[in-house]
Image (cartoon, grey):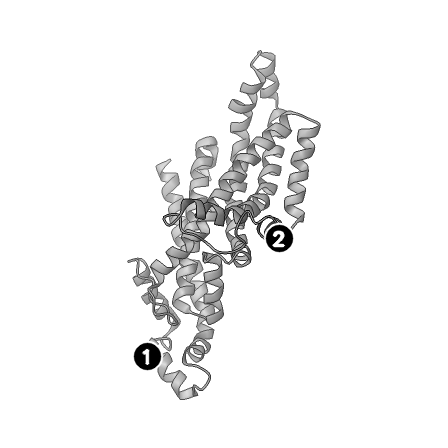
Amino acid sequence: MLAYVLRRLLIGVVLAVLVTFITYLLLSGSFRDMVSTLLGPDVTAADITRRTHALGYDRPVVVQYVDWLGHAVRGDLGTSLFTSSAVAPTVLSHIVVTMSIVFPALLIAVILSVTLGVWAASRSGAPDRIAQSISLVGHVIPALLTAIVLVVVFAVELKIFPATGFVQFIDSPVGWLRSVTLPVVVLVIAGMASITAQVRGSMIEELSKDYVRTLRTAGLPARSIVLKHALRNAGSPALTVISLEFISLFSHSVIIENVFALPGFGSFAFSSAQNIDVPVIMGVTLVSVVLVTVINLIADVANGYLNPKARLH
């Protein structure tokens, strides 16, 4: 298992280097535009050239990237060119807001989806129709539309939850809970679609296999067969979908944070991209890759535990 984890970590490191280098390479064509935006509307070509040289953006791209990477591995992601604030703590403060809605949403979606998927696979009729309907609704209705409907109903009309804004947990736990409830509900609805469909499909496939019929013939209780045997075997493909769903919810957060005016990672990344703030964009890219790599590693390790054959790949 240790060799399996180390191999996955090495793949993650290589992926992080490749993604950040490609990002830097793509940004290199916009360095003068960034400096022009930074200096203002009355800037001259000579001013842009002088400031570009002062910032070191006229050096070879590979040299610039290696310099950035050397600082990044030491935890120094540079300073924002537009706000003069350190990138690392700023990015982390924004990602905390995003994780405040993504992690609870993923956890709730997994619990509800697994429960519903297992229920639908082991019982025909209404449970199966409910599971398929939830999957269909989650796939068909955009998260943006769901967010708008929830704001209109629960924030504007009923005034139960705030329409916008974010409250830090340390400032007010109740205020934090009220501020994240609607965004979390939106993401739960979006996340349940794929997970429910995968769990239901995998469980139906497992329950139709010969070993399940053998266990039934041996007189094992139906609950034990479903939860101890079939669910474990169906868990491997479900874990893959869950890890992919985290990435999907993470990307959905860009839209959700703008709707609910949350100072999260997505809205922060979007505003940084508009300004072509290179240090911030690189910091956002690196943190995103690391986060996705860690989630995939957790899923791979769990998958290797459930399915030893997966460790060979």
Quadrant location of residue 223? top right
Q: Is residue 153 left or right of residue 183?
A: right
Question: Can you give x and y, in whole percent of width and height, for residue 155 in the image?
Answer: 57, 51
Which one is in front in this view, the residue at disc 1 or the one at disc 2? 2
Where residue 258 sits: x, y (%)?
53, 59
Q: Name the residue under label 2.
A: 152
Q: Is residue 218 visible?
A: yes
| Front residue of this view, candidates 281 and 153 | 153
In what element is the residue under mark 1? helix
Which element carries disc 2, helix, strand or loop? Answer: helix
Quadrant location of the N terminus in the rendered image: top left
Percent coordinates x, y for residue 151 in the rendering? 59, 52
Reading the image, the residue beneath label 1 is 54
Q: What percent of the width, then of the height, locates residue 196?
A: 60, 37
Picture quarter containing residue 226? top right
* 76 or 147: nearer the viewer: 147
Mark 2 surroundings: few (<14), some (14-19) or many (≥20) residues within 10 A: few
Is residue 57 shown above or below 166?
A: below
Residue 112 numbered mark, or none: none
Q: How crowded is mark 1: few (under 14 residues within 10 Å), some or many (20 or more)?
A: few
Tell me which amino acid carries mark 2: Val
Give the residue drawn at x 48%, y 66%: 271
Which residue does the image show at 36% across and 81% down from the upper left? 51
Q: Which residue is drawn at 59% across and 44% down?
A: 189
Q: How far apart are marks 1 and 2 (CA)?
A: 50 Å
Which amino acid is tagged 1?
Answer: Ala
Classify residue 276 by image quadrant: bottom left
